[in-house]
Amino acid sequence: MDYSICQALKRFPHHVQALIIYDICCQWSLHFRQHISESKFLELFDSLEITGAIGKWHLAAHIPECFPKFSLNFVEGTGEVDGEILETLWSPLDEVAGMAQAMSIPHAQEVIDDHMNDNNWWKIIRMCRDSHRMHVYHETDIISS
Ligand SMILES: [Zn+2]
């Protein structure tokens, strides 16, 4: 996890803030900076401020003390996000999972990849549609005020 996060954050050298949403962020974040300082393979910009959060579905299984510290409800700027990505993809994959079990491994991987890519494609389409709606909404709000 540490390596993945460091590699991902390297791609945004000019950003000063990052939000990491992870199922067990309460445990992972305890020693993240220490792991980086002790590793010769991990690096992170010192100026980067990292905010840790836990997806809403996973947070319900944590101890009550985790809620105020890691709930996305209290992270400014996150908007309405549940912080769950993979789990929401599992349900649509159930439709092809039975069929994929009868396929050869390469064929099953191709079919599952195709469905995941289709899901990602529709996410992008909906993001564009929704951001356009928000833009129109804000313009309307500015004009009417
Ligand atoms: Zn927790």
Image (cartoon, rainbow, N blue to C red):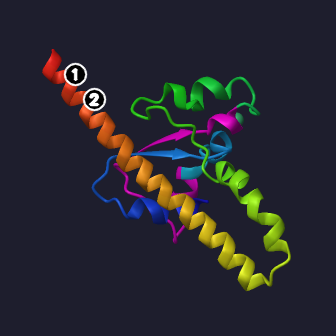
What span is colored magenta in the figure?
A: 33-59
Residue 5 showing in the rendered view: no
CB at mark 1 closer than 8 A to ligand 1? no
In the image, 26: left or right of 11?
right
Residues packed near mark 1 inside 10 Å, few (<14), some (14 to 19) or many (20 plus): few
Q: Looking at the image, which residue is at 61% across and 60% down?
A: 1
- Residue 6: x and y in percent read 48, 61
The residue shown at (62%, 72%) is 113
Which quarter is ligand 1 in? Answer: top right
- Residue displayed at 63% across by 34% down: 56
Task: Note whether 123 is above or below 7 in the view shown.
Answer: above
Is the residue at mark 2 in contact range of ligand 1, meaning its CB lies under 8 Å from it? no
Percent position of residue 80, x then y: 48, 32
**Image point (27%, 55%), residue name:** 14
Q: Which residue is mark 1?
A: 141
Distance of label 2 from label 1 (alpha carbons):
6 Å
Of residues 97 and 81, the one drawn nearer to the viewer in this rendering = 97
Where's residue 94, x and y in %? 77, 57
- Is disc 1 placed on a helix, strand or loop? helix
Q: Secondary structure at mark 2?
A: helix
Q: Quadrant of residue 107?
A: bottom right
Residue at which label 2 appears: 137
Q: Amino acid at mark 2?
A: Tyr
